[in-house]
Image (cartoon, rainbow, N blue to C red):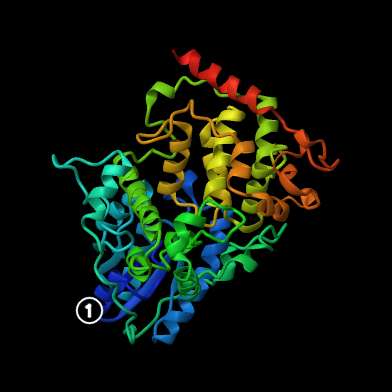
């Protein structure tokens, strides 16, 4: 019996439970559907499309080495899969379960037309399975992580199948290049290739490199000038690695690796949150902040553009925003600083930042992105208090960001010593670098005054 393997954010052959189940049924037709209709305004952003193009090319090559190939189709998933089933005589579809609200809707739609078998395999534990003593869902990360960690380690990862049985006849496939997922006019992705190698092989190379430093993760992860981050987030997002593979590769590294394992746990936590609150990317979890008087109008729009372009006059903020544009990624500590600056110094709605990150990040993940933004905004079910306002001019020297700033803000490359963190104050701001668009004290007082209005 020929079966369809429906691929989405699970673009790997190793530790792929849906693939193994499909092989057990007989000939397999792997298919990726580019569905921009079902997600609506959460269709993939530009940076994610760049990654997806290269990841799909890598996956097709890996499948062909196993005697198979990747079929590409475009349209609504349920329509496309039903049409493929009609063409090939397949009646069953295997997939890895996804938890974004649009994918849950798509799974229900497919299940109405075909036999759909969903498997778990992208997270440390199936989202929704870690429950409180009363059977409810955890809303706070710390007790969630404690309960999740008690179930660890995850099952040992399975390997790559030696061969993948092929159907007698292959259905037609779109050409990857016809999907126009690579930018051309202009090509803003010129810096991406130097930073990333999308695909399963690149993912394992990145994991191997991180294993050498995993024991020092807790010591170096907050230092933007040091390569302390794992940089595994886009590979995990697109499922080129499973969480179980990463856990088993580094869990015994010793040192401060537990801090990194907690980050894997945060990824699971975010999925549990969006299962409980499907509109978490667009709606405050704390409705007490719904009336917060966000700034709007021409001045706010100009400030938003300055933030997006890395022209705020705060070097650590500008370095992060320029790194994001140039590479599709930003250091985690700097993500928090830039998000806090937009929300609290500029008093601009967190959703504007969430959308910009969605378009610009190669690891743009609905759960993680929404949970992180609501944590910073103080609007999440588990979040920082709004009145806790990060001071970028304190954060920058605290985490030794000087060399990071010099790399990503070339106007400041010649600024020496501690002046790099605040050249305005030091009296050495270059002419081509902007003055601060708002003072720290002014921004802080404006944010606190906005909160007082709610009371």
Residue 8 in view in this figure: no
Image coordinates for residue 384, horizontal then vertical, percent: 43, 33
Image position of 214 (left or right of 145): right
Relative to 377, is 150 above or below?
Answer: below
Residue that mark 1 sits on: 24
Image coordinates for residue 391, horizontal then vertical, percent: 59, 34
The structure residue drawn at horizontal position 54% and vertical position 66%, both measured from the top left corner, is: 53
Q: Quadrant of the C terminus?
A: top left
Q: Quadrant of the N terminus?
A: bottom left
Image position of 229 (left or right of 298): left
Res 49 → quadrant: bottom right
Q: Which residue is the extreme one toward the right?
A: 431
For disc 1, the neighbor class at 10 Å (few under 14, some 14 to 19, many from 20) is some
The structure residue drawn at horizontal position 74% and vertical position 48%, both measured from the top left corner, is: 417
The structure residue drawn at horizontal position 50% and vertical position 72%, both measured from the top left corner, is: 209
Image coordinates for residue 279, horizontal then vertical, percent: 38, 38
The secondary element bearing badge 1 is classed as helix
Residue 13 in view in this figure: yes
Relative to 350, is 29 above or below?
Answer: below
Closest to the observer, 407 or 126:
407
Closest to the observer, 237 or 378:
378
Closest to the observer, 151 or 251:
251
Res 63 → quadrant: bottom left
Image position of 347 (left or right of 379): right
């Amino acid at each position: 019996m020929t079966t369809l393997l429906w691929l989405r954010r699970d673009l790997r052959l190793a530790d792929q439970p849906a693939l193994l189940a499909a092989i057990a049924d007989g000939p397999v037709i792997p298919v990726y559907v580019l569905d921009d209709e079902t997600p609506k305004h959460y269709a993939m952003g530009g940076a994610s499309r760049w990654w997806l193009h290269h990841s799909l090319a890598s996956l097709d090559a890996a499948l062909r080495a196993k005697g198979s190939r990747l079929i590409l189709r475009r349209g609504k998933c349920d329509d496309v899969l039903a049409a493929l089933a009609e063409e090939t005589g397949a009646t069953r579809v295997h997939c890895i379960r996804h938890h974004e609200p649009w994918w849950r809707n798509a799974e229900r739609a497919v299940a109405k037309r075909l036999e759909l078998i969903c498997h778990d395999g992208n997270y440390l534990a199936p989202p929704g399975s870690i429950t409180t003593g009363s059977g409810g869902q955890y809303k706070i990360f710390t007790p969630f992580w404690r309960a999740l960690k008690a179930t660890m380690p995850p099952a040992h990862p399975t390997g790559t199948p030696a061969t993948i049985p092929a159907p007698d006849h292959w259905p037609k496939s779109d050409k990857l290049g016809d999907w126009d997922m690579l930018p051309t006019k202009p090509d803003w992705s010129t810096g991406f290739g130097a930073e990333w190698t999308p695909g399963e092989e690149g993912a394992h190379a990145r994991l191997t490199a991180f294993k050498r430093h995993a024991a020092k993760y807790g010591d170096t992860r907050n230092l933007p000038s040091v390569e302390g981050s794992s940089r595994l987030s886009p590979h995990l997002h697109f499922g080129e690695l499973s969480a179980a593979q990463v856990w088993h590769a580094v869990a015994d590294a010793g040192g401060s690796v537990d801090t990194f394992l907690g980050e894997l746990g945060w990824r699971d936590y975010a999925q549990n949150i969006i299962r409980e609150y499907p509109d978490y990317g667009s709606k405050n979890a704390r409705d007490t902040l719904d009336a917060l008087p966000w700034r709007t109008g021409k001045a706010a729009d100009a400030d938003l553009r300055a933030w997006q372009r890395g022209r705020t006059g705060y070097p650590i903020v500008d370095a992060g925003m320029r790194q994001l544009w140039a590479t599709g990624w930003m250091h985690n500590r700097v993500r928090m600083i830039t998000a806090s600056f937009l929300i609290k110094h500029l008093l601009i709605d967190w959703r504007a930042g969430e959308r910009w990150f969605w378009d610009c990040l190669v690891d743009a993940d609905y759960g993680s992105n929404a949970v992180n933004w609501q944590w910073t905004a103080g609007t999440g079910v588990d979040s920082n208090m709004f009145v806790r306002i990060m001071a970028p001019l304190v954060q920058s020297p605290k985490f030794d960001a000087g060399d990071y700033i010099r790399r990503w803000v070339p106007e400041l490359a010649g600024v020496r010593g501690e002046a790099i963190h605040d050249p305005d104050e030091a009296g050495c701001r270059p002419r081509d670098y902007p003055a601060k668009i708002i003072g720290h004290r002014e921004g802080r007082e404006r944010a606190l005054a906005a909160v007082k209005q709610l009371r």
